[in-house]
């Protein structure tokens, strides 16, 4: 068999070191030619999409295990052929900065970026109702931004995000640490940095302690910042729907204070009105700030707001694999700390003290094997005592729940 016989949709064995494996099963999602080199975009079976990548032909094992895609009906085949490979190449092609383009002022470029973002948003909201649904689904499978530069870090992205094509086609997308505007060329980015007046997220600072601050933003009032934030976060969140219409949401931005301003380290969003008891819609710790405890701070703060609202709450499901690990760890710490402080307690009392929903409490207790039965009665058993940990100080919160009318939420 020859490598030229491999087509989009083929499932093949690939030389790849993941976990303890050297050969991983993968599906070919796209094929391109760059600098006379054939590249294959692959998704590894049973692995998260953030590991999807472009590989060269030498990584593909040509053996009897190759599965070719099933033939489709003639009309479907014709639809598939309507998307020429060249158009994909044009979208992915890395172009050199154009001298004339780089002379455009940063302010003018920002306006163009926002206009293109709004156009992208409008297109994305109707994409499922068009005849190009198949093509759109294919595009959304592929990462369109390779790397971003933000806060001094160059970061590999994980997932697709609908940045304008003239931005996503560049090798690196440069993002302002303060306003989150995006640029395709370094010169434009540096010029913007000289002129950007923002030194913290717009909105209200509602928490401040030990160099960390939370800012509350209203998606209806701070549209540009919140849309830029959604585009940025979508590069690292795959399981959530992008909120192009940011009006119904509140955003809570966690920042680290430095000499020249407040730098975003993470955020979570929540709906202004939610009948399902969710206190988080999206939650993200910036990749360069992970494994530093910021994720726990974000979760703890979301429950602090729930306590202030006097409600039991839970994050919107489903959670990502990484998010589920973080939440389970947090829930276990909070629930077990309550159990350690008393000899007899009910599930409803645990919920009241932690603001964690009954389903989440029972889920943790069951998974940890804490529910036992003696003489037909349920008993909660711990392997050891736990201390209650708090990442945020309730006394530093200056916030009252926002009352939203139906008119405001539309």
Image (cartoon, grey):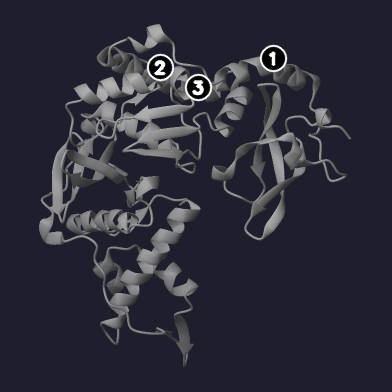
Badge 1: few (under 14), some or many (20 or more) residues near its Cα, within 10 Å?
few
Identify which residue is drawn at 37% across, 23% down.
Answer: 186
Q: Which mark is residue 185?
A: none
Element under label 1? loop
Quadrant placement of the N terminus: top right
Q: Residue furthest top?
A: 100
Q: Position of residue 199 (x, y in %)?
A: 17, 34
Q: Position of residue 210 (x, y in %)?
A: 16, 56
Element under label 3? loop
- Where residue 390 sits, quadrant-wise, is bottom left
Q: Is residue 217 above or below residue 83?
A: below
Identify which residue is drawn at 81% across, 36% down.
Answer: 68
Q: Is residue 209 visible?
A: yes
Q: Which mark is residue 82?
A: 1
User: How many numbered discs, if any?
Assistant: 3
Q: Is residue 410 visible?
A: no
Q: Position of residue 124 (x, y in %)?
A: 47, 24
Q: Nearer the viewer, residue 287 or 132?
A: 287
- Where residue 21 sits, quadrant-wise, is bottom right
Marks 2 & 1, CB-CB < 8 Å contact: no
Badge 3: few (under 14), some or many (20 or more) residues near its Cα, within 10 Å?
many
Between circles 1 and 3, the one closer to the viewer is 3
Q: Position of residue 133 (x, y in %)?
A: 59, 24
Element under label 2? helix
State the residue position of label 3.
Answer: 169
Q: Is residue 383 above or below residue 53?
A: below
Quadrant placement of the C terminus: top left
Q: CA distance from mark 2 to mark 1?
A: 24 Å
First along the sequence among labels 1 and 3? 1
Q: Which mark is residue 119?
A: 2
Identify which residue is drawn at 50% across, 54% down.
Answer: 321
Q: CA distance from mark 1 to mark 3?
A: 22 Å
């Amino acid at each position: 068999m020859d490598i030229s016989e491999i087509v989009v949709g083929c499932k093949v064995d690939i030389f790849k070191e993941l976990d303890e494996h050297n050969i991983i099963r993968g599906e070919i999602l796209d094929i391109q030619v760059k600098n006379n080199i054939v590249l294959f975009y692959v998704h590894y079976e049973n692995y998260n999409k953030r590991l999807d990548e472009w590989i060269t032909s030498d990584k593909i094992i040509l053996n009897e295990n190759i599965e070719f895609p099933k033939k489709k009906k003639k009309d479907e085949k014709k639809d598939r052929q309507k998307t020429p490979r060249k158009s994909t190449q044009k979208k992915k092609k890395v172009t050199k900065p154009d001298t004339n383009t780089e002379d455009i002022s940063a302010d003018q470029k920002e306006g163009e970026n926002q206009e293109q973002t709004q156009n992208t948003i409008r297109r994305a909201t109707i994409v499922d109702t068009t005849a190009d649904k198949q093509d759109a689904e294919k595009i959304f499978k592929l990462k369109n931004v390779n790397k971003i530069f933000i806060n001094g870090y160059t970061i590999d992205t994980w997932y697709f995000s609908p940045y304008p094509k003239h931005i996503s086609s560049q090798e690196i997308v440069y993002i302002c640490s303060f306003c989150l505007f995006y640029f395709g060329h370094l010169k434009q980015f540096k010029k913007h940095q000289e002129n950007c007046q923002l030194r913290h997220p717009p909105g209200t600072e509602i928490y401040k302690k030990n160099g960390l601050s939370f800012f509350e933003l209203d998606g209806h009032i701070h549209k540009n910042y919140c849309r830029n934030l959604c585009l940025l976060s979508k590069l690292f969140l795959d399981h959530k729907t992008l909120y192009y219409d940011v009006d119904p949401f509140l955003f809570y931005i966690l920042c680290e204070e430095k000499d020249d301003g407040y730098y975003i380290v993470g955020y979570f969003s929540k709906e202004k009105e939610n009948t399902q008891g969710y206190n988080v819609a999206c939650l993200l710790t910036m990749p360069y700030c992970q494994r530093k405890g910021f994720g726990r701070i974000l979760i703890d703060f979301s429950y602090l707001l729930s306590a202030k609202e006097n409600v039991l709450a839970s994050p919107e499901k489903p959670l990502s694999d990484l998010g589920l690990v973080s939440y389970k760890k947090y829930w276990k710490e909070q629930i077990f700390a309550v159990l350690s402080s008393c000899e007899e307690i009910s599930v409803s009392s645990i919920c009241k003290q932690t603001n964690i929903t009954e389903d989440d409490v029972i889920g943790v207790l069951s998974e940890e094997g804490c529910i036992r039965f003696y003489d037909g009665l349920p008993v909660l058993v711990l392997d050891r005592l736990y201390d209650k940990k708090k990442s945020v100080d309730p006394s530093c919160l200056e916030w009252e729940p926002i009352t939203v009318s139906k008119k405001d939420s539309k």
